[in-house]
Amino acid sequence: MAGTGQVLFIQGGGAGTHDEWDNELVDSLRRELGNGYEVRYPRMPDEDDPNYASWSAAIRREIAALGDGAVVAGHSVGATILINALAERPPERELKMIALIAAPFVGAGGWPGDEFELPHDLGARLPHGVPVHVFHGLQDETAPPSHADLYARVIPQALPHRLPGRDHQLNNDLSEVAEAIKLDDRGPVAQE
């Protein structure tokens, strides 16, 4: 791979999440990606009480600071706000991949909540041609695994990854996320 790949990781919500929970996910991702990747991990405003307006504004600022070809990833409610922000206003930067990790689905069949409710045509609103990977642990007791299926319904291009034995934090192991990023770096596989 030429140069350094950029990954922007958006934390989940809750008191202490940045420093006491999702930092372990970021450490795993950095370890699994190895050299050649820069993983940015900004602190979101008011992490103990996430709201769409302040978090989406912070996410847009962070994306604007990236180069073209970056990966954006979010965990838990951070992923829900990330995907909503991308659908609401496509980024000026060209993205290589979107990764949703243990993302609660807000809307019909998922969690209630007007502020984060996802549009029914979410997939059509996302940047064209950018793969969307949805990673969800099958032992997730925070956001039920069925939420991955709800995302797959509204994002037809989504690639769901259902991970047996993994909890809401994916047992602090983002090896599958790193592998998807690395595979995407290799480009399309030639068909024979």
Image (spheres, helix red, strand yellow):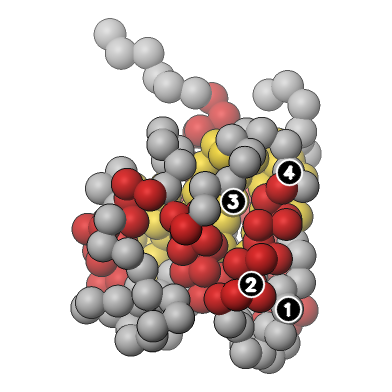
Tell me how many marks there are.
4
Q: Quick one: SS at disc 4?
A: loop
Q: Residue at x 72, y 55 (%)?
A: 62
Is there any visible trace of residue 48 in the rendered image? yes
State the residue position of label 2. Answer: 55
Q: Nearer the viewer, residue 106 or 103?
A: 106
Please say if 72 is above or below 79: above
Residue 45's label in the rendered image is 1
Kindly report the distance in space between the C-alpha atoms of the residues bearing marks 2 and 1.
Answer: 6 Å
Q: Amino acid at mark 1?
A: Pro
Kindly report the distance in space between the C-alpha atoms of the residues bearing marks 3 and 2.
Answer: 14 Å
Instruction: Work out which quarter of the rendered image holds the N terminus and state it.
Output: top right
Q: Are marks 2 and 1 in contact (CB under 8 Å)?
A: yes
Using a 10 Å C-alpha cutoff, classify the residue at mark 3 as few (fewer than 14 neighbours), some (14 to 19) or many (20 or more): many
Residue 150's label in the rendered image is none
State the residue position of label 3. Answer: 72
Residue 66's label in the rendered image is 4
**As drawn, is 63 to the left or to the right of 170?**
right
Q: Amino acid at mark 3?
A: Val
Q: Nearer the viewer, residue 137 or 89?
A: 89
Point out the tag, 2 or 1, that comes first from the N-terminus.
1
